[in-house]
Image (cartoon, rainbow, N blue to C red):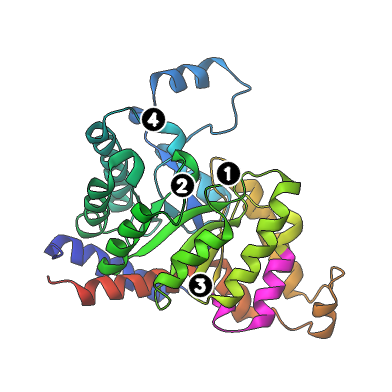
Amino acid sequence: MSLSANTAVRMADRRRYLADNRHRLTIDADVHPTDRAALPNDIKEQIKTDPNYFHGRPILSENLLATMTRAHVDMALCWQNPAMLSYGDDPAENAARLTAANDRIAALADTHPTRVIPGGWTDPKALGVQAACRLAEHCVLNLAMPVVKMNPAQNAYPIDSDMVIEVVDVIVGLGAVPAFHFGADTPFTPTEGLVKIAERHPDHPVIAVHMGGGGGHFVVSEDTYQSARAAGLSHPNIFYPISAKRDAHLVSDLITYAEAGPPFCHNLALATDTPYCDMTWVMGGWRATLDALASGANQGDPRLAANPDLFDGEMIQAIRGGNFANLMIAAYDRILAGLDL
């Protein structure tokens, strides 16, 4: 497999920008923009006529940068919005639709390379395994995407199924990072399934978006929250963008991983899951939380009382954007080094 010269140049430029600016960037590691032209007709009408339609209300690509600026977000990992993409019974048609969605994300990143990190998306159930593998290759080799995601919850397949593992092997072979929706909102993404994926390639990162959140009922989610935290502390290749997770757990997550030190403290990132959560609201909360931690405010946790300097400037910036920037830099390096130009 080989990269085109154009793809290699795009990746090298984006890698260089991240490396030069990781000391200052605030990165939202989970955003789902949608092109206005790609909106389904029923959603277009609902947006116009129903002021109460909020869950899943799309953030249009044309509004993305202004939203990021209001939220004080420098860059965002963007991938397609699954609520705006419907599958049918024809795998080939499903593949065409999802390919087009990925192409639109890539075009957005090409237009705004210092604001958008493009993330790919594939689906072995809706497309079929071989088509899902080909789409993963397209995302990396042609669209310059360092990450390719699957969402077992969206289309009802186990995260550790044979078809998923086959696609993961392809993504890892490309040097890119496999990513998953990982939450307690369905039975398809249990922690033990994520662990099986992580243990298959223990020296390669895997992104588990939401850190066990993702829309599950608070009481139901509690066990997943706890097991997700433990899994990450025993598997240093699991990387968690924290989004759509009950806010009462966030400070404890941050303290636990900071106290654990490297490499674990480098495996968390801020995220919002926009538009399923509101970027301005969520990032405002993140900023206030990090400011409080940086000030040494105890917030009732005895671990901070014992170590009030745990969140120094380096740790705060790592969480704010440095950790995710480094994850993407390493992915670009693997892809560029491992594939023929």
Rendered image: mark on residue 172: none
Rendered image: mark on residue 86: 4
Which residue is the site of mark 2?
152
Q: Is 258 above or below relative to 273?
A: below
In this view, the residue in front, 14 or 301, is 301
Which residue is the site of mark 1?
186
Amino acid type at image mark 3: Asn
In this view, the residue in front, 267 or 203, is 203
Q: In the rendered structure, which segment of residues is drawn in magenta?
A: 251-266
Of labels 1 and 3, earlier in sequence is: 1
Q: Check if residue 329 falls in the magenta segment.
A: no
Instruction: Mark 4 and mark 3 in contact? Answer it, CB < 8 Å.
Output: no
Which residue is the site of mark 3?
323
Which numbered disc, 2 or 3, marks the residue closer to the eye? 2
> Is residue 24 among the parts visible in the rendering?
no
Which numbered disc, 4 or 3, marks the residue closer to the eye? 4
Of labels 1 and 2, earlier in sequence is: 2
Residue 281 drawn at (x, y percent): 66, 47
Within 10 Å of disc 1 (Cα), the crowding (few <14, some 14-19, many 20+) is some
Question: Which quadrant of the figure has residue 168?
Answer: bottom left
In the rendered structure, the answer to whether residue 78 lies left or right of residue 217 reads left
Residue 286 drawn at (x, y percent): 66, 59
Callout 3 secondary element: helix
3D distance between C-alphas at marks 4 and 3: 33 Å
Residue 104 drawn at (x, y percent): 30, 42
Within 10 Å of disc 2 (Cα), the crowding (few <14, some 14-19, many 20+) is many
Amino acid type at image mark 1: Thr
